[in-house]
Amino acid sequence: MKSFLRTTGILFRAHLVRTVRTRRCLVATLLCLFPVGVACLIALVAHFEGPPPQDIQVALLWNMLVQIITPLVALSYGSAVIAEEIEDRTITYLFTRPLERAAILLGRWLAALVPLLVALTVSVVTVQTILRSLGTEEGVAWAPDDLDRDLLLTTLLGGAVYSALFAAAGALFKRPVLLGLGYTFVYELLLGSLPGSNQKATVQYYLRSFLLGEDETLQQAFSDNMALIPLAEPSAALRTLILILVGALLVGAWRLAKREYVLSA
Amino acid sequence: MSAVIEARELGRYYGQVAGLNELTAEFPSGVVGLVGPNGAGKSTLLRLIVGELSPSRGSIRVLGQDPFANRELYRRIGFCPQQDALYEDLSGFEIVRLLLRLGGFDAAESKRRAERALERLSLGERMHHRVRTYSKGMRQRVRIAQAIAHDPELLVLDEPMTGLDPLGRREVLELLRELGAEKKHVLFSSHILYEVEHLTAEIVLIHRGRLLAKGRLGEVRALLNRHPRKVELVARRARDLARELVGWNEVLAVRLGSQQGIEELLSVETRDVGAFWRRFTALAAGASFGVSEARSQDASLEAVFDYLIA
């Protein structure tokens, strides 16, 4: 265990700086800046037209940031955790070292998680600040103040869970990015939006449950933007999300321990 | 002493393609050259030896252990892969030090060993520059440095001279010779016999995924020279040609084959294909047997024989 943690730490430190230098970090940053740009546009329009309706704020914070941007940013970082070593053909060096292969996944995933969470935090906080300054068409704040904190937590949790899923996909499959895009747009968005208990098979459902819980006022505020089914308790949703995260990493680590990669010269 | 590496009916398939086919061989200690033309299966065999691939069939033992994902064994093995892949945004020193740290060495020892290995490969001055600024030869030296830095018992190198200039080749040959003198086991692959000859007389020759010959280079050459080989000729006056060839010392047997229009196929078995072709060329130029085609039954195998016997 000590050696596993030591290896994880070495890989985390080595790849943290490397991750920030990559092109995918730039892509992720641009993705995170997109909602900020939209918020600025809304602020510009609000300057002439008055405060925006509540729906627009929910759409920006939930539908865009949590449902689309978070999985995409997580995909950008998460899919590279193992796939980058394979594509660059450097995995040979790690696979011929006396280390537990699971540490490769964990160390590199943690190194990807840091810039991912920083980027999402900056994006969410900036968008929230802009929207709070505008108020709403209805003349009241679009949601209680503590929702800002909860929404940030939900986004970060979503980022962590999605990145773990995509990291595992990188260990399991050859084209994790394509798979991740399909998963994000077809499975999560489509299945998570259709009415019915099928929503419970998505990460989105548990993120939504974690954020909204049993607060009917909040559910009402979000109900126009999504087909809500009865939500899980926030604590149960949190447990499920953690279970998905840990499960994904375990499956990825198990696959990595047994897998061989045929690299061309 | 028991063999360093033992392969028993070792096979590795990539879908329908056989990368290695029922190879049985024991690799002795010391410096051994793995020889064969491109595509012979050398890299597949080396990847099986370092446990990066697992056998599709048969078994392999390295230093008495099953190598696939064997962490304990990796402390005793150094591997220099053929692919020109490195962490581009790191320096040569950072790469070697990182891999030493992952090998279990502490920070100070990793630094010391990384510097020593890179200096041994004449990269002392540039070791702190990013590898993306390195020449091909310098990158190859980094790959070799990471393989030797932890002082392994068995060093496995896949085409280690690739990309090196003549001076670099000489330095690496010298390094491998030194490692051999230090009683390390060194197994390296090459498709250039000249390189192998300069380093060791002990060779393993593979072709199309199969073991072709093994032993001292001189013995292998003699063995291959004695190996009967077949050539095919197509001629209008095939029967007259057969009568002529039967009298040659180099020819072991002549068989008349099928009729092909006005021509006939002639299958010739020779004990010395070089001498046969030389004499046959002179014959074909002087006499009119109507030879329209002359071919070896296995052109790529011929190439292997030729370059070993040359």
Image (spheres, coloured by chain):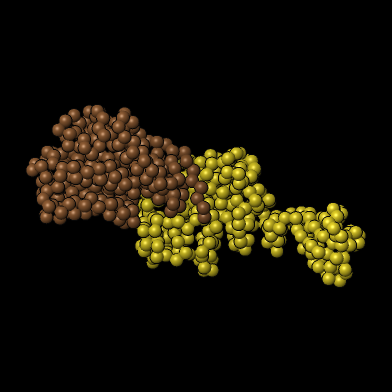
Q: Position of residue B72 (x, y in %)?
A: 46, 41
Q: Position of residue B180 (x, y in %)?
A: 55, 55
* Total numbered labels: 0
Q: Quadrant of residue A55?
A: top left
Q: Quadrant of residue B241?
A: bottom right
Q: Is residue A154 left or right of residue A76?
A: left
Q: Position of residue A246 (x, y in %)?
A: 33, 35
Chain B tint as drawn:
yellow
Q: Residue at x 65, y 48 (%)?
A: B210
Q: Residue at x 14, y 50 (%)?
A: A130
Q: Quadrant of residue B218?
A: bottom right
The quadrant of the picture occupied by the N terminus of chain A is top left
**Which of the pair A183/A168 is nearer the observer?**
A183
Q: Is residue A207 left or right of residue B61?
A: left
Relative vertical location of residue A81 with respect to residue A246 in this rendering, above or below: below
Q: Is residue A178 left or right of residue A262?
A: left
**Can residue A123 be seen here?**
yes
Q: Residue furthest bottom?
A: B286
Q: Residue at x 31, y 34 (%)?
A: A194
Q: Position of residue B130 (x, y in %)?
A: 37, 62
Q: Is residue A245 left or right of residue B155?
A: left
Q: Residue at x 65, y 51 (%)?
A: B208
**Can residue A82 be seen here?**
no
Relative vertical location of residue A102 with respect to residue B255 in this rendering, above or below: above
Chain A tint as drawn:
brown
Q: Residue furthest left?
A: A139
**Which of the pair B195/B81 is nearer the observer?**
B81
Relative vertical location of residue B37 with respect to residue B278 in this rendering, above or below: above
**Which of the pair A43/A159 is nearer the observer?**
A43
